Image (spheres, rainbow, N blue to C red):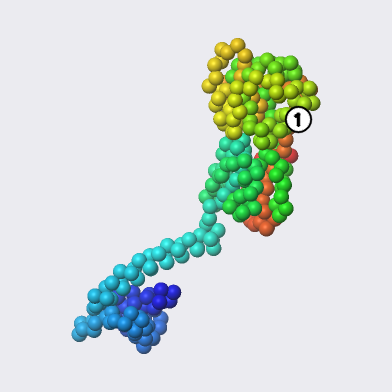
Amino acid sequence: MLRDFAKLQTFLMVIKEKSFSKASVKLGISQPAVTQQIKFIEDYLDTKIFRRKKNGIVLTKEGEDLYRIAQRLEKAIQSSEKEFLKIINKGFTFVMGSSYAIGNYILPNYLGEIKKRIDNEVFMNVDLSCNVIEQLEEKKIDVALIESPVFKEGIIYREWVEDELVVFSNQPIKKHLSADDLLEFDWICRNEDSHTRKLTSEVFEEMGVQCNNFNVLGVLGSPTAIKETIMNADKNADRPIVSIMSRHVVKHDIDKGTLFGARLKNHKITRKLYIAYSKERKHDAFVDNVVNYLLSLYRV
């Protein structure tokens, strides 16, 4: 019965018009068809739902109960139809997944423009690069922006930005640091499985520096946590507190003078940031629009 809502719609129209004949005109079907559908409902429920009187029709008690149920069903179906139309008209939320540095410090600058270009809501999900790619595979997000090359079959990767990792502190430090200089600092480090940590360790090995010789005050899992820790540290400490992360994370604060940046002597820590999306979506107009816009911002 509930699967055939058309008969309940006929029932609702009869109530609205207070007439079988007027309901038939509104529905575009014959009056016998209306009568037949109402009879089907009464046979199904084994009860009368209308009582005919000289001045029209009135609902029985069972008819009133059915009317309340049918109204709730109608509202639920109308709400569901709106959701279907959103899908048909592409009125959905476009979900972007990104790694921490990108999601917290690069992408927010462009979300407004992305929203305008695709005329849709845009939601951002920030996580580790490996988790973001998993979400892309599971079709939970539409486009991924990652800082770690987590390459998988079925996904297209586009080189986007060449990022540089820099040393920074809340105290003035040399602009170019030697291996010996690195040992004079207190360190806040990224967790060992992060891409930033791996790249940094490789360059330190080239410089002949062992991370085990550093005085490490803490190991944290996100760029924001590291930056906030260093910014709130004692600016008059005998040994500067430092860390290494994307220049995008600290650029604004270095420009303001609240943080101080440095590079390694004769070494540059760089990496590519990537845009990733499913091969199944390579001709999707929304994905193309977003990807092409992002690529236009930074010419690699």
Most foreground residue, 134 or 98: 134
In this picture, residue 197 sits left or right of residue 232: right
| Residue 124 in the image, given as x and y percentages of width and height | 56, 44
Q: Residue at x 63, y 32 (%)?
A: 191
**Which residue in the structure is indicated by mark 1?**
202
| Residue 37 in the image, given as x and y percentages of width and height | 37, 83
| Residue 30 in the image, given as x and y percentages of width and height | 38, 86
* As drawn, 75 above or below 32: above
In the rendered image, which quarter contains the N terminus?
A: bottom left
* As drawn, 250 above or below 177: below
Q: Residue at x 71, y 54 (%)?
A: 154
Quarter of the view holding residue 60: bottom left
In this picture, residue 164 sits left or right of residue 218: right
Q: For mark 1, does the 10 Å Cα neighbourhood hold few (<14), some (14 to 19), or many (20 or more) residues?
A: few
- The answer to whether one can see residue 262 in this image is no
Q: Residue at x 54, y 48 (%)?
A: 122
Looking at the image, how many numbered discs can be counted on the residues?
Answer: 1
Quarter of the view holding residue 97: top right
- The answer to whether one can see residue 55 in this image is yes
* As drawn, 264 above or below 26: above
